Amino acid sequence: MSMKSLRSLFAMLVIPLVLSMGLGLSASAIAADDQNSQQQAGKTSEADLWRAVKAGDSGFTTAQGIEPGVLINVVGNQGKDVRNQYLTPVMAITVVGVFVAFLFFYLVNGPSKLSKGFSGKMVLRWTKADLWIHWVMASSCMVLIFTGLNIMLGKYVLQPYIGEGFWAALIYGSKFIHDWVGPIFIVSWVLCVVKWMPMQTFKMYDLKWFLVVGGYINFGPFKGQHPDSGFANAGEKMWFWSLTIFGLFIAASGLMLVLPGLDLPREASMAALLIHSISAIIIIAFTIVHIWMATVLSEGGMECMVSGYCDENWAAQHHNVWYDEIKENNSIVYKD
């Protein structure tokens, strides 16, 4: 075979081999670049996905229900932060602050005494039905207050000092009792509002009651001043209307929180929780004031809600307008 033929044969064998190797290397480089691009795109897409999840954006899902495509609800976390950072300490300050303020007032001022002492004659003020409504509502309200305080504050003031097992049972029991006593309070609250509202309209003489602090001051220029009052004095009317308004808020928001069949969006549930907490703070504050005024600061006042009768001198001193009316129209009823 001639040299020329050998060169031709070598070219025919080697050149295609080199070309195929070059094409292979080029294809591999292109494939590697594509893979790197896909991996980088995947990483970017995954990061964007989790940023959207954390922001509370809604995705796609075949599940049914309220906001099924939202993995993390931002509103829920924001509402929890508001409750823990602001409402919880406000509730603690309210309970301690109002109690301490009235304790200090009692130690400095003392109770409001009857200027003429007890007469021994008892006048009918509340019917048996009124007493039942009051004590059912008062009892259920106190149970709700104590269980609610444990739910809100217990993890700060009790949990660190008791065993985990006892704390778990206590918080579970508080939640269970709170949910089931709530309807009892709502029913008694409705009866209270309907039955007692006609006696709770404000009059012009109620303004003076506030100006002289109801005649409870035992020193200075206010001593001995007993302002005019109807069946309910101005302070009792303020307590009634506070209970009426915020009792409505706390009842409606409570039902929203415990009835899963409502299937509310997370925003509505969190709004209900915040309204429930704010209303509870206000009702707790007024409840503490009411208990102090009825049991400690008003001599003879507690007897009214025990037997339904009040001393005649107590009626004339603290509710003179009402007392004069029932004497004038001869509707006064004395205890036998």
Image (tube, rainbow, N blue to C red):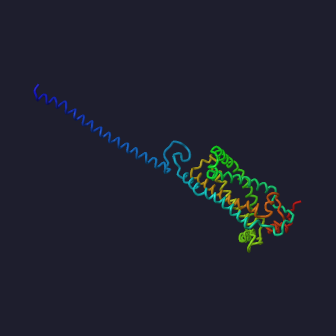
Q: Residue at x 35, y 41 (%)?
A: 35
Quadrant of res 247: bottom right
| Quarter in which the C terminus is drawn | bottom right
**222 relative position to 312: left or right:** left
| Quarter in which the N terminus is drawn | top left
**277 relative position to 117: left or right:** left
Query: Image height check: is 159 above or below 234?
Result: above
In the rendered image, the residue lying farthest to the bottom is 221
- Please count the marks in the image: 0
**102 relative position to 327: left or right:** left
In the rendered image, the residue lying farthest to the top is 1
Q: Residue at x 13, y 28 (%)?
A: 6
Coordinates of residue 292 in the picture (x, y in percent): 73, 61
* Residue sitting nearer the eye, 205 or 109: 109
Coordinates of residue 248 in the picture (x, y in percent): 67, 56
**116 relative position to 151: left or right:** right
Coordinates of residue 280 in the picture (x, y in percent): 66, 56
In the rendered image, the residue lying farthest to the right is 336
Query: Image height check: is 193 above or below 54?
Result: below
Coordinates of residue 69 in the picture (x, y in percent): 51, 46
